[in-house]
Amino acid sequence: MDGTGSGSDRWRFAADRLIVKLFKFRIWIAPAVMLLALPVFAIWDPAPWKLIWIGAVLVCLGVLSVFEYRRVKALREVSSVTVVINLVLMFLVQGAMVYITGGIMSPLIVIFIPMALASGMLVQSYRQVLLVIAVPACIAVLLAGSALYGWVPYSLPAFFELGSALVTMPVLVWGTAGFLVFILIMTSKIASLVRRAIEQQVREGLAARQESLESLASRNRELQSVSRTIAHELKNPLASIQGLAQLLARSAEPGKPSERLEVMQREIARMREVLDGFRDFTRPFTALGVERCDLCGLLREVVALHEGLAGSRGLALETVSEPMEIECDPHKVKQALVNLLQNALEASPPGGTVTLRAGAWRGEGVRIEIQDAGPGLSEELSEHLFEPGFTTKEHGTGIGLVVARSIAEQHGGCVEIDSGASGGCVASLSLPARPSPAALPEEGT
């Protein structure tokens, strides 16, 4: 999705949340105002038709508010037509409240202004905004005409003690109505301009971020390609140097020359180990080769590779797994499990048992746990486990866990390291039933 689409989607999402909050606010505030007006009129201006009017408005307002709030809250996206209809209904109900509390001279007439602000912020097209604003404008004209010419019954409450003098002044009445209409139009226009400015800023910000991410991704791909090439080119000379060192060691005389050649061979072996780890670090970013995989068979292969190492350390390997199949890149998953199992074997003391358990994860996904018999994980170490280069081993590279996590994330899963309930550490590799489409190679590539 491009930056523009994302900006519009984010604004719509925020607008939808605002609409729901607006309806929720209306549920409590508007009925509260009418409930307050009902006893006031009953005591100081108990005209029957006014009390019936207030009661009818109160019932309509409550039913409308609850219905619309529940309906809109259940929708994932609020359409522009729904917003327009609700704003029009709210203006009509507010017009009824304004009429019964004094008409064009009502102190509640200012409630039209916040609604005009909401119209400009929530409605996308300004033509639709003008359509909504036409409703309170017509109400203002109707109220002014009613005050001057008696189009509808006079509704100024007696307890205001204003008499009929004010509503018989055409300049004052039409001036009030005209000024209100002007304020409504200007408020909605300013709100619309503010909304468009915010949308533009969001779009530009997201577009700039998307461009930066694409540039960074392209740069990362270039660096990964160069890194793999360098690692491959260095591996062959190192193999030749190691072979020559072995030949020299065979013919070297005992003493310093022989000792130095042994040191040289060990350092070459260490360099190759670091180089292999570096190649593994770049390999997870290549496209996945997904196929249907028997999890039990994969675990057996990993265990078989480490039986010799476990035996030399006096450790036992135990596997507990149900028959399960998932779609994954078996070579990369195997690599991740090898890294986690090697860490578990190196952390366990002689006589211990390293256990591999596999079970369901998030429905059809799988979770593979490798529990060692070591001393456990300190809080200080847990903060640095997945930092490239961090290691507690004397000859470690600090890349194994990073590679395992990268493979898991490429599949849409994760790697976690936690302290075991009965001691030791538990390394878990969680994978979905099928990798996310973004991780799969595109057709034709």
Image: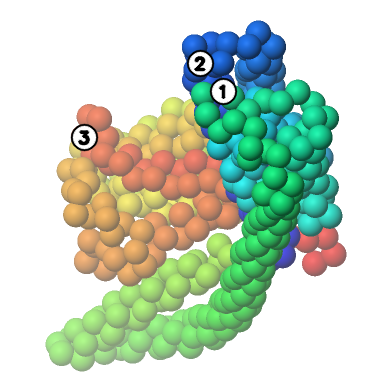
Residue at mark 2 to residue at mark 3: CA–CA distance: 79 Å
Q: Where residue 3 sits in the image (x, y, percent)?
A: 68, 66
Residue at mark 1 to residue at mark 2: CA–CA distance: 7 Å
Q: Where residue 413 sits in the image (x, y, percent)?
A: 53, 46
Mark 1 and mark 3 lie on one chain; the one further toward the N terminus is 1
Mark 1 and mark 2 lie on one chain; the one further toward the N terminus is 2
Q: Amino acid at mark 1?
A: Ala
Q: Amino acid at mark 3?
A: Gly
Secondary element under disc 1, as helix, strand or loop, is: helix
For the residue carrying disc 3, how many other residues have a C-alpha within 10 Å: few (<14), some (14-19), or many (20+)?
A: some
For the residues labelled 1 and 2, say whether their Cβ atoms are less than 8 Å apart.
Answer: yes
Q: Which of the 4 image quadrants contains residue 216?
A: bottom right
**Residue 247 in sight in this render:** no
| Mark 2, residue position | 44
Q: Residue 423 — which label?
A: 3
Does residue 207 appear to the left or right of 174 in the view shown? Answer: left
Q: Residue 158 — which label?
A: 1
Residue at mark 1 to residue at mark 3: CA–CA distance: 82 Å
Secondary element under disc 2, as helix, strand or loop, is: helix
Question: Which residue does the image show at 67% across and 49% down from the upper left?
Answer: 172
Question: Which residue does the image show at 28% across and 85% down from the upper left?
Answer: 264
Taking depth in this image into account, of 323 and 27 the one nearest to the observer is 27
Q: Which of the 4 image quadrants contains residue 198?
A: bottom right
Question: Which residue does the image show at 57% across and 27% down from the upper left?
Answer: 30
